[in-house]
Amino acid sequence: MPVSRRRALALMGGGTVLAAGAGAGAFLATRTPHAALAPWVRAGSYGDARLDALSWALLAPNPHNRQPWEAELVGDDVLRLYRDPARNLPQTDPHGRQLTTGMGCFIELMVIAASASGHGVDLTLFPDGQADGRPVAEARFMPGAASPDPLFAHVPARGTIREAYAAHLPDRAAVQSLSAHARVITDADDVADLRQLTWDGWLTEALTPAAHGETVDLMRIGRREIEANPDGLALGGPFYESLALAGLLTRRAQRDPQSRGFQFGISTFERILAATPAYAVIVTQGNDAHTHIDVGRRWMRFDLTATGLGLATHPLLQVTQEYAEMATLRVQAQTLLAGEGETVQFIARLGHGPTRRARSPRWSLETRIRHG
Ligand SMILES: Cc1cc2nc3c(=O)[nH]c(=O)nc-3n(C[C@H](O)[C@H](O)[C@H](O)COP(=O)(O)O)c2cc1C
Protein backbone atom coordinates (compact mmCIF):
# COMPACT_ATOMS: atom_id res chain seq x y z
CA MET A 1 0.00 0.00 0.00
CA PRO A 2 1.45 3.40 -0.92
CA VAL A 3 1.96 5.78 1.91
CA SER A 4 2.39 9.50 2.37
CA ARG A 5 4.75 9.20 5.29
CA ARG A 6 4.02 12.58 6.82
CA ARG A 7 0.27 12.05 6.57
CA ALA A 8 0.54 8.60 8.06
CA LEU A 9 2.58 9.82 10.96
CA ALA A 10 0.15 12.64 11.61
CA LEU A 11 -2.77 10.23 11.63
CA MET A 12 -1.16 7.47 13.61
CA GLY A 13 0.90 9.36 16.17
CA GLY A 14 4.17 10.36 14.55
CA GLY A 15 6.36 11.01 17.57
CA THR A 16 6.21 7.44 18.75
CA VAL A 17 6.95 6.05 15.32
CA LEU A 18 9.91 8.32 14.79
CA ALA A 19 11.34 7.39 18.17
CA ALA A 20 10.96 3.69 17.46
CA GLY A 21 12.41 4.14 13.98
CA ALA A 22 15.47 6.07 15.15
CA GLY A 23 16.40 3.40 17.65
CA ALA A 24 15.87 0.57 15.27
CA GLY A 25 17.64 1.64 12.07
CA ALA A 26 20.00 -1.33 11.81
CA PHE A 27 17.20 -3.74 12.59
CA LEU A 28 14.95 -2.26 9.94
CA ALA A 29 17.64 -2.28 7.25
CA THR A 30 17.48 -6.08 7.24
CA ARG A 31 13.73 -6.38 6.75
CA THR A 32 13.52 -7.57 3.12
CA PRO A 33 11.71 -10.95 3.02
CA HIS A 34 14.22 -12.61 0.67
CA ALA A 35 12.80 -16.14 0.81
CA ALA A 36 9.25 -14.90 0.15
CA LEU A 37 10.45 -13.05 -2.97
CA ALA A 38 12.82 -15.80 -4.18
CA PRO A 39 10.23 -17.35 -6.56
CA TRP A 40 10.56 -14.20 -8.73
CA VAL A 41 14.28 -14.94 -9.10
CA ARG A 42 14.07 -18.73 -9.38
CA ALA A 43 11.38 -18.73 -12.09
CA GLY A 44 12.51 -20.62 -15.18
CA SER A 45 15.62 -22.09 -13.54
CA TYR A 46 14.45 -25.70 -13.03
CA GLY A 47 15.75 -27.18 -16.31
CA ASP A 48 12.46 -29.01 -16.96
CA ALA A 49 9.72 -27.70 -19.26
CA ARG A 50 6.82 -28.42 -16.91
CA LEU A 51 8.54 -27.17 -13.75
CA ASP A 52 9.82 -24.07 -15.50
CA ALA A 53 6.34 -23.24 -16.80
CA LEU A 54 4.85 -23.75 -13.31
CA SER A 55 7.56 -21.63 -11.72
CA TRP A 56 6.49 -18.71 -13.92
CA ALA A 57 2.78 -19.43 -13.55
CA LEU A 58 2.89 -19.01 -9.78
CA LEU A 59 3.70 -15.34 -10.33
CA ALA A 60 0.16 -14.84 -11.68
CA PRO A 61 -2.30 -12.41 -10.06
CA ASN A 62 -4.85 -14.08 -7.79
CA PRO A 63 -7.40 -12.93 -5.20
CA HIS A 64 -5.98 -11.99 -1.79
CA ASN A 65 -2.72 -13.57 -3.04
CA ARG A 66 -4.06 -16.92 -1.79
CA GLN A 67 -2.15 -18.86 -4.49
CA PRO A 68 -4.62 -21.75 -4.40
CA TRP A 69 -2.85 -23.70 -7.15
CA GLU A 70 -1.33 -27.14 -6.79
CA ALA A 71 0.21 -29.28 -9.54
CA GLU A 72 0.82 -32.99 -9.93
CA LEU A 73 3.32 -34.30 -12.48
CA VAL A 74 1.94 -37.31 -14.35
CA GLY A 75 4.18 -39.39 -16.63
CA ASP A 76 6.66 -37.50 -18.79
CA ASP A 77 4.51 -34.78 -20.24
CA VAL A 78 1.28 -34.18 -18.27
CA LEU A 79 0.40 -31.85 -15.42
CA ARG A 80 -2.76 -32.01 -13.37
CA LEU A 81 -3.70 -28.70 -11.80
CA TYR A 82 -5.82 -28.41 -8.67
CA ARG A 83 -7.32 -25.64 -6.55
CA ASP A 84 -6.55 -26.14 -2.87
CA PRO A 85 -9.82 -25.75 -0.86
CA ALA A 86 -7.79 -24.87 2.25
CA ARG A 87 -7.17 -21.53 0.54
CA ASN A 88 -10.82 -20.64 -0.01
CA LEU A 89 -12.20 -17.19 0.81
CA PRO A 90 -15.66 -18.04 2.19
CA GLN A 91 -16.65 -14.46 3.04
CA THR A 92 -15.57 -12.48 -0.02
CA ASP A 93 -15.71 -15.30 -2.58
CA PRO A 94 -18.36 -17.73 -1.31
CA HIS A 95 -18.71 -19.59 -4.63
CA GLY A 96 -15.00 -19.66 -5.50
CA ARG A 97 -15.64 -17.56 -8.60
CA GLN A 98 -12.67 -15.24 -8.08
CA LEU A 99 -10.35 -18.05 -7.00
CA THR A 100 -11.29 -19.94 -10.17
CA THR A 101 -10.54 -16.76 -12.12
CA GLY A 102 -7.13 -16.76 -10.42
CA MET A 103 -6.64 -20.35 -11.63
CA GLY A 104 -7.37 -19.05 -15.13
CA CYS A 105 -4.60 -16.45 -14.73
CA PHE A 106 -2.26 -19.24 -13.57
CA ILE A 107 -3.17 -21.48 -16.52
CA GLU A 108 -2.68 -18.71 -19.07
CA LEU A 109 0.68 -17.76 -17.61
CA MET A 110 1.72 -21.44 -17.65
CA VAL A 111 0.78 -21.68 -21.35
CA ILE A 112 2.64 -18.44 -22.16
CA ALA A 113 5.74 -19.64 -20.28
CA ALA A 114 5.62 -23.07 -21.96
CA SER A 115 5.64 -21.34 -25.34
CA ALA A 116 8.95 -19.69 -24.45
CA SER A 117 10.61 -23.12 -24.71
CA GLY A 118 8.57 -24.00 -27.81
CA HIS A 119 6.07 -26.19 -25.92
CA GLY A 120 2.44 -26.16 -26.91
CA VAL A 121 -0.05 -27.13 -24.20
CA ASP A 122 -3.06 -29.31 -24.91
CA LEU A 123 -5.47 -28.27 -22.17
CA THR A 124 -8.55 -30.07 -20.86
CA LEU A 125 -10.54 -28.13 -18.28
CA PHE A 126 -12.24 -30.09 -15.46
CA PRO A 127 -11.32 -33.48 -17.01
CA ASP A 128 -13.14 -35.41 -14.24
CA GLY A 129 -16.02 -32.98 -13.72
CA GLN A 130 -16.32 -30.15 -11.23
CA ALA A 131 -16.80 -31.91 -7.89
CA ASP A 132 -14.56 -30.80 -5.02
CA GLY A 133 -11.10 -32.27 -5.14
CA ARG A 134 -11.17 -32.97 -8.88
CA PRO A 135 -8.52 -31.35 -11.10
CA VAL A 136 -9.25 -27.94 -12.57
CA ALA A 137 -7.24 -28.82 -15.67
CA GLU A 138 -5.04 -31.41 -17.26
CA ALA A 139 -2.22 -30.08 -19.43
CA ARG A 140 -0.19 -32.11 -21.91
CA PHE A 141 3.10 -30.47 -22.90
CA MET A 142 4.06 -30.91 -26.56
CA PRO A 143 7.62 -29.98 -27.55
CA GLY A 144 8.00 -27.95 -30.74
CA ALA A 145 4.27 -27.21 -30.95
CA ALA A 146 4.31 -23.47 -30.16
CA SER A 147 6.29 -20.37 -30.96
CA PRO A 148 7.25 -18.01 -28.13
CA ASP A 149 4.50 -15.65 -26.99
CA PRO A 150 5.83 -12.07 -26.86
CA LEU A 151 3.89 -11.40 -23.64
CA PHE A 152 6.32 -13.69 -21.80
CA ALA A 153 8.91 -10.87 -21.74
CA HIS A 154 6.72 -8.81 -19.39
CA VAL A 155 6.22 -11.36 -16.62
CA PRO A 156 9.13 -10.25 -14.37
CA ALA A 157 7.88 -6.64 -14.38
CA ARG A 158 4.19 -7.37 -13.69
CA GLY A 159 2.43 -6.59 -10.43
CA THR A 160 -0.70 -5.01 -9.00
CA ILE A 161 -0.15 -1.27 -8.46
CA ARG A 162 -2.28 0.07 -5.59
CA GLU A 163 -1.22 3.67 -5.98
CA ALA A 164 -2.52 6.97 -7.37
CA TYR A 165 -2.33 7.08 -11.17
CA ALA A 166 -1.55 10.14 -13.32
CA ALA A 167 -4.55 12.02 -14.72
CA HIS A 168 -3.77 11.49 -18.43
CA LEU A 169 -5.36 8.63 -20.34
CA PRO A 170 -3.55 5.70 -21.95
CA ASP A 171 -3.02 6.60 -25.62
CA ARG A 172 -5.30 5.38 -28.38
CA ALA A 173 -2.94 2.63 -29.62
CA ALA A 174 -2.59 1.25 -26.09
CA VAL A 175 -6.35 1.22 -25.61
CA GLN A 176 -6.73 -0.60 -28.91
CA SER A 177 -4.31 -3.40 -28.04
CA LEU A 178 -5.74 -3.78 -24.53
CA SER A 179 -9.27 -3.96 -25.94
CA ALA A 180 -8.49 -7.43 -27.31
CA HIS A 181 -8.75 -8.74 -23.74
CA ALA A 182 -11.19 -6.48 -21.86
CA ARG A 183 -13.40 -3.45 -22.39
CA VAL A 184 -11.41 -0.30 -21.68
CA ILE A 185 -13.45 2.61 -20.31
CA THR A 186 -12.05 6.09 -20.87
CA ASP A 187 -15.16 8.28 -21.27
CA ALA A 188 -15.01 10.88 -18.48
CA ASP A 189 -18.59 10.38 -17.28
CA ASP A 190 -18.32 6.58 -17.31
CA VAL A 191 -15.00 6.74 -15.46
CA ALA A 192 -16.55 9.05 -12.85
CA ASP A 193 -19.40 6.56 -12.34
CA LEU A 194 -16.92 3.72 -11.92
CA ARG A 195 -14.77 5.69 -9.49
CA GLN A 196 -17.83 6.17 -7.31
CA LEU A 197 -18.94 2.55 -7.67
CA THR A 198 -15.53 1.01 -6.91
CA TRP A 199 -15.03 3.34 -3.95
CA ASP A 200 -18.48 2.47 -2.58
CA GLY A 201 -17.61 -1.22 -3.00
CA TRP A 202 -14.25 -0.87 -1.31
CA LEU A 203 -15.81 1.00 1.63
CA THR A 204 -18.69 -1.46 1.96
CA GLU A 205 -16.25 -4.35 2.22
CA ALA A 206 -14.12 -2.44 4.74
CA LEU A 207 -17.20 -1.77 6.91
CA THR A 208 -18.55 -5.34 6.69
CA PRO A 209 -16.85 -7.08 9.63
CA ALA A 210 -16.93 -10.64 8.24
CA ALA A 211 -15.61 -9.64 4.80
CA HIS A 212 -13.03 -7.20 6.13
CA GLY A 213 -12.02 -9.70 8.83
CA GLU A 214 -11.04 -12.17 6.10
CA THR A 215 -8.55 -9.62 4.77
CA VAL A 216 -7.29 -8.71 8.24
CA ASP A 217 -6.69 -12.40 9.00
CA LEU A 218 -4.55 -12.56 5.87
CA MET A 219 -2.43 -9.52 6.73
CA ARG A 220 1.23 -10.43 7.06
CA ILE A 221 2.77 -7.68 9.15
CA GLY A 222 6.54 -7.42 8.87
CA ARG A 223 9.24 -9.69 7.55
CA ARG A 224 8.81 -12.55 9.99
CA GLU A 225 5.12 -13.03 9.17
CA ILE A 226 5.69 -12.61 5.44
CA GLU A 227 8.46 -15.22 5.39
CA ALA A 228 6.34 -17.63 7.46
CA ASN A 229 3.29 -17.22 5.17
CA PRO A 230 4.28 -15.65 1.82
CA ASP A 231 0.71 -14.98 0.73
CA GLY A 232 -2.20 -12.73 1.72
CA LEU A 233 -1.72 -8.99 2.15
CA ALA A 234 1.98 -8.35 2.79
CA LEU A 235 2.69 -5.23 4.85
CA GLY A 236 6.47 -5.25 4.82
CA GLY A 237 9.37 -2.82 4.53
CA PRO A 238 10.83 -0.33 7.00
CA PHE A 239 7.78 1.91 7.21
CA TYR A 240 5.27 -0.79 8.14
CA GLU A 241 7.86 -2.44 10.40
CA SER A 242 8.20 0.91 12.21
CA LEU A 243 4.47 1.18 12.72
CA ALA A 244 4.28 -2.41 13.93
CA LEU A 245 7.21 -1.92 16.30
CA ALA A 246 5.51 1.12 17.76
CA GLY A 247 2.32 -0.88 18.25
CA LEU A 248 0.40 1.27 15.75
CA LEU A 249 -0.13 -1.39 13.10
CA THR A 250 -1.97 -4.30 14.63
CA ARG A 251 -4.65 -6.67 13.42
CA ARG A 252 -6.84 -5.50 16.30
CA ALA A 253 -6.67 -1.85 15.18
CA GLN A 254 -7.35 -2.89 11.60
CA ARG A 255 -10.61 -4.50 12.77
CA ASP A 256 -11.76 -1.37 14.61
CA PRO A 257 -13.35 1.25 12.34
CA GLN A 258 -12.72 3.91 15.02
CA SER A 259 -8.97 3.30 15.19
CA ARG A 260 -6.50 5.67 13.56
CA GLY A 261 -4.97 2.82 11.58
CA PHE A 262 -8.34 1.92 10.08
CA GLN A 263 -9.18 5.57 9.36
CA PHE A 264 -5.79 6.02 7.74
CA GLY A 265 -6.43 3.05 5.43
CA ILE A 266 -9.75 4.57 4.41
CA SER A 267 -8.40 8.04 3.65
CA THR A 268 -5.43 6.57 1.76
CA PHE A 269 -7.60 4.40 -0.44
CA GLU A 270 -10.08 7.18 -1.09
CA ARG A 271 -7.24 9.31 -2.44
CA ILE A 272 -5.81 6.46 -4.52
CA LEU A 273 -9.11 5.41 -6.06
CA ALA A 274 -9.93 9.02 -6.93
CA ALA A 275 -6.70 9.12 -9.00
CA THR A 276 -7.93 6.75 -11.72
CA PRO A 277 -8.17 7.90 -15.35
CA ALA A 278 -9.50 4.65 -16.89
CA TYR A 279 -10.95 1.24 -16.09
CA ALA A 280 -10.92 -2.23 -17.59
CA VAL A 281 -14.02 -4.39 -17.34
CA ILE A 282 -14.78 -8.00 -18.28
CA VAL A 283 -18.45 -8.94 -18.67
CA THR A 284 -19.53 -12.43 -19.76
CA GLN A 285 -22.58 -14.20 -21.11
CA GLY A 286 -22.15 -17.30 -18.95
CA ASN A 287 -21.27 -17.49 -15.25
CA ASP A 288 -19.93 -21.03 -14.83
CA ALA A 289 -16.49 -22.31 -13.91
CA HIS A 290 -15.37 -22.57 -17.55
CA THR A 291 -16.30 -18.91 -17.96
CA HIS A 292 -14.37 -17.96 -14.80
CA ILE A 293 -11.24 -19.72 -16.10
CA ASP A 294 -11.64 -17.85 -19.39
CA VAL A 295 -11.99 -14.52 -17.55
CA GLY A 296 -8.71 -15.24 -15.74
CA ARG A 297 -6.95 -16.11 -18.98
CA ARG A 298 -8.14 -12.86 -20.53
CA TRP A 299 -7.09 -10.86 -17.46
CA MET A 300 -3.62 -12.42 -17.51
CA ARG A 301 -3.14 -11.29 -21.10
CA PHE A 302 -4.51 -7.84 -20.25
CA ASP A 303 -2.16 -7.54 -17.25
CA LEU A 304 0.93 -8.49 -19.30
CA THR A 305 -0.08 -6.32 -22.26
CA ALA A 306 -0.54 -3.34 -19.91
CA THR A 307 2.82 -4.05 -18.25
CA GLY A 308 4.49 -4.10 -21.67
CA LEU A 309 2.89 -0.75 -22.49
CA GLY A 310 4.16 0.78 -19.24
CA LEU A 311 0.66 0.94 -17.76
CA ALA A 312 -0.44 0.07 -14.24
CA THR A 313 -3.41 -2.09 -13.31
CA HIS A 314 -5.27 -2.70 -10.05
CA PRO A 315 -8.19 -5.15 -9.89
CA LEU A 316 -11.07 -3.98 -7.68
CA LEU A 317 -13.73 -6.68 -7.63
CA GLN A 318 -15.61 -5.77 -4.46
CA VAL A 319 -18.84 -4.87 -6.29
CA THR A 320 -18.89 -8.27 -8.02
CA GLN A 321 -18.83 -10.15 -4.71
CA GLU A 322 -21.70 -12.37 -3.67
CA TYR A 323 -22.59 -11.52 -0.04
CA ALA A 324 -25.66 -9.76 1.34
CA GLU A 325 -24.06 -6.42 2.24
CA MET A 326 -22.82 -6.04 -1.34
CA ALA A 327 -26.12 -6.92 -3.02
CA THR A 328 -27.23 -3.36 -3.80
CA LEU A 329 -23.89 -2.36 -5.28
CA ARG A 330 -23.72 -5.60 -7.27
CA VAL A 331 -27.04 -4.67 -8.88
CA GLN A 332 -25.68 -1.18 -9.60
CA ALA A 333 -22.61 -2.70 -11.27
CA GLN A 334 -24.80 -4.95 -13.37
CA THR A 335 -27.00 -2.02 -14.40
CA LEU A 336 -24.01 0.15 -15.26
CA LEU A 337 -21.91 -2.39 -17.12
CA ALA A 338 -23.82 -5.50 -18.19
CA GLY A 339 -26.55 -6.22 -20.70
CA GLU A 340 -29.47 -8.62 -20.32
CA GLY A 341 -28.26 -12.02 -19.09
CA GLU A 342 -24.65 -10.89 -18.69
CA THR A 343 -22.48 -10.95 -15.55
CA VAL A 344 -19.85 -8.43 -14.50
CA GLN A 345 -16.79 -10.52 -13.66
CA PHE A 346 -13.82 -8.22 -13.43
CA ILE A 347 -13.21 -4.50 -12.83
CA ALA A 348 -9.77 -2.94 -12.62
CA ARG A 349 -8.19 0.49 -12.48
CA LEU A 350 -5.93 1.35 -15.39
CA GLY A 351 -3.48 4.21 -15.85
CA HIS A 352 0.08 5.47 -15.63
CA GLY A 353 1.44 4.53 -12.22
CA PRO A 354 4.86 4.55 -10.61
CA THR A 355 7.36 2.51 -12.63
CA ARG A 356 8.97 0.80 -9.63
CA ARG A 357 6.81 -2.21 -8.80
CA ALA A 358 7.10 -3.82 -5.39
CA ARG A 359 6.87 -7.57 -5.94
CA SER A 360 4.43 -9.52 -3.84
CA PRO A 361 5.49 -12.68 -2.01
CA ARG A 362 4.95 -16.20 -3.30
CA TRP A 363 5.11 -19.72 -1.90
CA SER A 364 7.97 -21.60 -3.57
CA LEU A 365 7.27 -24.02 -6.41
CA GLU A 366 8.36 -26.92 -4.21
CA THR A 367 5.46 -26.26 -1.82
CA ARG A 368 2.94 -26.26 -4.67
CA ILE A 369 3.76 -29.72 -6.06
CA ARG A 370 1.47 -32.59 -5.07
CA HIS A 371 3.07 -35.95 -4.72
CA GLY A 372 0.41 -38.35 -5.99
C1 LIG B 1 -9.82 -12.48 -9.46
C2 LIG B 1 -8.95 -11.45 -8.81
C3 LIG B 1 -9.52 -10.53 -7.92
C4 LIG B 1 -8.73 -9.54 -7.33
N1 LIG B 1 -9.34 -8.60 -6.52
C5 LIG B 1 -8.60 -7.60 -6.00
C6 LIG B 1 -9.22 -6.55 -5.25
O1 LIG B 1 -10.44 -6.50 -5.13
N2 LIG B 1 -8.43 -5.59 -4.70
C7 LIG B 1 -7.05 -5.59 -4.86
O2 LIG B 1 -6.38 -4.71 -4.34
N3 LIG B 1 -6.45 -6.57 -5.59
C8 LIG B 1 -7.17 -7.55 -6.16
N4 LIG B 1 -6.56 -8.52 -6.92
C9 LIG B 1 -5.10 -8.49 -7.09
C10 LIG B 1 -4.46 -9.49 -6.13
O3 LIG B 1 -4.59 -9.04 -4.81
C11 LIG B 1 -2.96 -9.66 -6.52
O4 LIG B 1 -2.91 -10.24 -7.79
C12 LIG B 1 -2.23 -10.54 -5.52
O5 LIG B 1 -2.14 -9.90 -4.26
C13 LIG B 1 -0.81 -10.84 -6.00
O6 LIG B 1 -0.10 -9.64 -6.21
P1 LIG B 1 0.52 -9.24 -7.62
O7 LIG B 1 -0.60 -9.11 -8.60
O8 LIG B 1 1.20 -7.92 -7.35
O9 LIG B 1 1.48 -10.31 -8.04
C14 LIG B 1 -7.32 -9.50 -7.56
C15 LIG B 1 -6.77 -10.42 -8.47
C16 LIG B 1 -7.57 -11.38 -9.09
C17 LIG B 1 -6.94 -12.33 -10.09
Image (cartoon, rainbow, N blue to C red):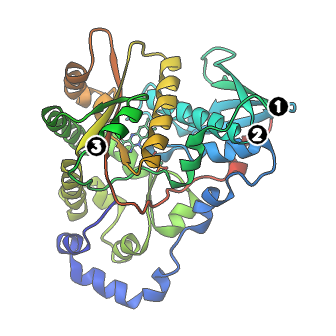
Mark 1 — residue? 77
Q: CA distance from mark 3 to mark 2?
A: 41 Å
Q: Residue at x 20, y 19 (%)?
A: 335
Mark 3 residue type: Pro
Q: Residue furthest top?
A: 340
Q: CA distance from mark 2 to mark 1?
A: 8 Å
Depth check, front residue: 163 or 321: 163
Q: CA distance from mark 1 to mark 3?
A: 46 Å
Q: Is residue 209 above or below residue 76?
A: below
Label 3 or label 2, whichever comes before in sequence order: 2
Disc number placed over residue 189 in the picture, else none: none
For discs 3 and 2, the disc positioned in front in the rendered view: 2
Would you call the spot at circle 3 few (<14 residues within 10 Å), some (14-19), or many (20 or more)? some
Mark 2 residue type: Arg
Q: Residue furthest left?
A: 189
Q: Residue at x 20, y 64 (%)?
A: 260
**Residue 124 in the image, given as x and y percentages of width and height:** 67, 19
**Residue 3 in the image, given as x and y percentages of width and height:** 29, 66
- Can you see residue 370? no
Q: Judging from the image, what secondary structure is the residue with disc 3 in?
A: helix
**Residue 255 in the image, given as x and y percentages of width and height:** 29, 53
Depth check, front residue: 188 or 133: 188
Mark 3 — residue? 209
Mark 1 residue type: Asp
Label 1 or label 3, whichever comes before in sequence order: 1
Could you say which quadrant of the image residue 22 lies in?
bottom left
Disc number placed over residue 50 in the picture, else none: 2
